[in-house]
Image (cartoon, rainbow, N blue to C red):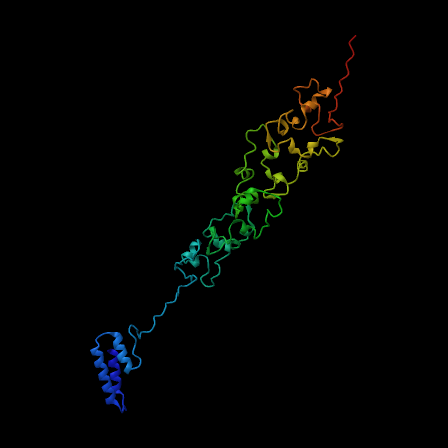
Amino acid sequence: MANVRRHVHKLISTPGRGKRPVVLLALVVAVGLALLTGCRSDTNYKVLSFFFDGVPQPGATNAAPAQVAENTAATTNTVSPNKPVVPLNLKISHPPFVAGNCAACHDDFSKGMKGPLLTVCFTCHDNFLAKAKAKHAPVESGECMDCHEPHESVNKHLLKQTGTALCLNCHDDPLAKGKFKHDAVVNGDCLDCHDPHASANGKLLKKAIPAACYDCHDDFTKGKKDVHQPVSDGDCMSCHEAHASNQKGLLIKSSPELCWTCHDNFLEKAKFKHDPVEDCTSCHNPHNSNEANLLAKPEPALCLDCHDQKDLDHVKAHAGVAGKSCTDCHDPHVGDNANLLKPVTAKPATAPAAK
């Protein structure tokens, strides 16, 4: 009915209408029909739309369509002094950044650093370089942001990358050329053994050798009668590589070349040599032993690993040697004869009888 009233008002107020009485009559008829048909909207629509254009259908509305609100939330953080920042969907945030305290690190005017980077960082962080003997080069040079993000990071300690991946940005992969690889390096992280900033130990080790090695390996100095000197001195690296090697046991060199680093090379001028001397560890334990000379087993059990007792029993010279050591007569390494017999000590001349 509101639309009918608007149409009536328009017809009455519009000048120059020659057929105004006819239109008014039609309008009266339409209004009457609308009243007679009651309030059914579909019937009213049929009657009114017959006489007038633009009559809205039942249930329709002339209201403007609703506007969908756009997400105007900022996708980045805008930092202002002393105004806390809502962190992004990251795990770790630098506390001054979250607090909006830009002036803690930056100059208020230029937004540059307040001073040398290392000096700024040590305003809050302990100066771990002050008493350190070994210092990581990028740390000593004040290049903190080579490894760390200054504001936020998905990694612990605001690191740009995790563990070993970060180290390999500067260091060569220590496992790349080694046939045998240290399990601790393959399965672990550089920071398991090394301090990333500074240390009292060489190579930035968290602990001095051999304590660092004994975190995983047994202490070779305990409970044994005979201990190899490099082991007792804690000098594991004199024989072993820390990361990878082309030699079994992560050795620096193969045996016996490695042994010649400290021991005299008795093979150079030897006429005859014992076959096992090509690998010293076939008879000797390189770390410790309960036997003299670091033997892997006591004699003659060690010799019988290769020699058969029945063959030895057929040698006439072995008659009556039961209970004796093989090395009483034989040199275990080299000799001037095929049987590696030791030189016979000449008996002293008998003094003439007194007259």
Q: Position of residue 84 (x, y in %)?
A: 39, 58
Quadrant of the rendering where the N terminus is positioned: bottom left
* 38 lies left or right of 290: left
Residue at point 70%, 32% (across, down):
275
Q: How many marks?
A: 0
Residue 204 showing in the rendered view: no
* 26 lies left or right of 66: left
Residue 304 higher or lower than 33, as above or below: above
Task: Between residue 163 and residue 140, name the one nearer to us.
Answer: 163
Q: Quadrant of residue 15?
A: bottom left
Residue at point 43%, 59% (across, down):
102
Residue 48 higher or lower than 307, as above or below: below
Residue at point 23%, 89% (across, down):
21
Q: Quadrant of residue 353?
A: top right
Q: Position of residue 74 (x, y in %)?
A: 41, 63
* 288 lies left or right of 152: right
Residue 184 higher or lower than 291, as above or below: below
Q: Position of residue 221 (x, y in %)?
A: 56, 32
Quadrant of the rendering where the C terminus is positioned: top right
Q: Quadrant of residue 334?
A: top right
Residue 186 showing in the rendered view: yes
Residue 312 higher or lower than 278, as above or below: above
Task: Between residue 8 and residue 131, name the one nearer to us.
Answer: 8
* 302 lies left or right of 184: right
Question: Quick one: which residue is furthest to the top in this view?
Answer: 355
Q: Position of residue 7 (x, y in %)?
A: 26, 82
